[in-house]
């Protein structure tokens, strides 16, 4: 059983040796969010789009799931409660610590890993996975790391696997990190088609936010 997060020793951050200055800035900004309390996105509510895929009109049989950018683990624990074998990754140690506490409190088994979704080869996540879930992680990954993210999922995808991704369109956030000049937050359908060869974009549903957001569903075709 893990110790409470406050007393845990920080884990070594393997990816930190490889981060370029742009990634380092993104990392620092994300860390600040988690250090200063509850980040704005941490609603504790599982979105209906994931619920539909797990227990609703788009339900898939439980299998293996990998969540990219799991934050404090709301959706990873939700999937585990519904019979999925879940691995979940986040770049920020503190978020992973909180996710472990959440899973322990709910009595569910989730493999929670501190690591970089664009460097899955450094983690013990062989797959294959039937479902990938990304709530607002990819759309904040610096553009030059996005192909590595896509390749990591492609190598670990079971035939017919789904990727359910929520993302902001490119405009609404502008550049949330002025010091990182090329951090173009946001994602489009065209970008996903280009970056995920061997996958088919089977659904794009606008989100209900006040700015343009989208739920993308991709299917691995082989
Ligand atoms: C907008 S938050 C959403 C968190 C969580 N999915 C939720 O709904 O509460 C995006 C998450 O992705 C994580 N993240 C960003 N870039 C990442 C990367 N390269 N690898 C792993 N996690 C990353 C952040 O630390 C953050 O927890």
Image (cartoon, helix red, strand yellow):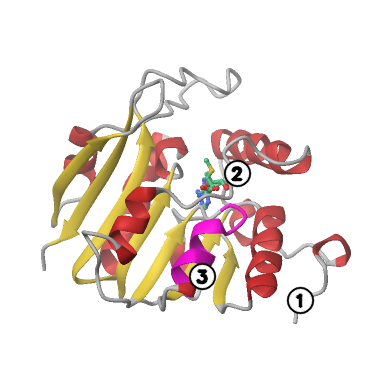
The residue under label 1 is: 2
Q: Residues within 10 Å of mark 3 (few under 14, many from 20)?
A: some
Front-most of residues 127 and 142: 127
Which image quadrant for residue 23?
top right
- Mark 2, residue position: 42
Is residue 79 rendered magenta in the image?
yes
The Cα atoms of the two marked residues, 2 and 3, are separated by: 25 Å
Q: Are marks 1 and 2 in contact (CB under 8 Å)?
A: no
Label 2 secondary element: loop
Residue ID at (59%, 56%): 15
Q: Is residue 174 above or below residue 122?
A: above
Q: Which residue, as the protein is rendered here, is positioned at the far right?
A: 7
Q: Which residue is mark 3?
A: 123
Q: CA distance from mark 3 to mark 1?
A: 19 Å
Q: Nearer the viewer, residue 161 or 79?
A: 79
Could you say which quadrant of the image residue 106 lies in? Answer: bottom right
């Amino acid at each position: 059983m893990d110790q409470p997060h406050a007393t845990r020793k920080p884990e070594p951050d393997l990816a930190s040796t490889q981060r370029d200055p742009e990634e380092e800035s993104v990392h620092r900004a994300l860390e600040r969010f988690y250090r200063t309390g509850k980040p704005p996105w941490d609603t504790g509510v599982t979105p209906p789009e994931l619920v539909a895929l797990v227990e609703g009109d788009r339900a898939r049989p439980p299998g293996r799931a990998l969540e990219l950018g799991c934050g404090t683990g709301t959706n990873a624990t939700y999937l585990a409660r519904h019979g999925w074998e879940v691995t979940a990754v986040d770049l920020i140690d503190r978020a992973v610590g909180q996710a472990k506490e959440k899973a322990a409190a709910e009595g569910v088994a989730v493999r929670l890993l501190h690591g970089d979704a664009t460097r899955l080869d450094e983690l013990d996540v062989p797959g294959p996975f039937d479902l990938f879930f990304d709530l607002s992680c990819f759309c904040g990954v610096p553009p030059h790391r996005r192909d590595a993210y896509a390749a990591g999922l492609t190598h670990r995808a079971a035939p017919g696997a789904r990727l359910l991704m929520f993302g902001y369109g490119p405009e609404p956030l502008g550049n949330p990190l002025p010091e990182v000049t090329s951090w173009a937050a946001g994602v489009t359908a065209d970008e996903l088609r280009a970056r995920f060869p061997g996958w088919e974009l089977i659904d794009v549903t606008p989100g209900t936010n006040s700015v343009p957001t989208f739920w993308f569903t991709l299917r691995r075709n082989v």
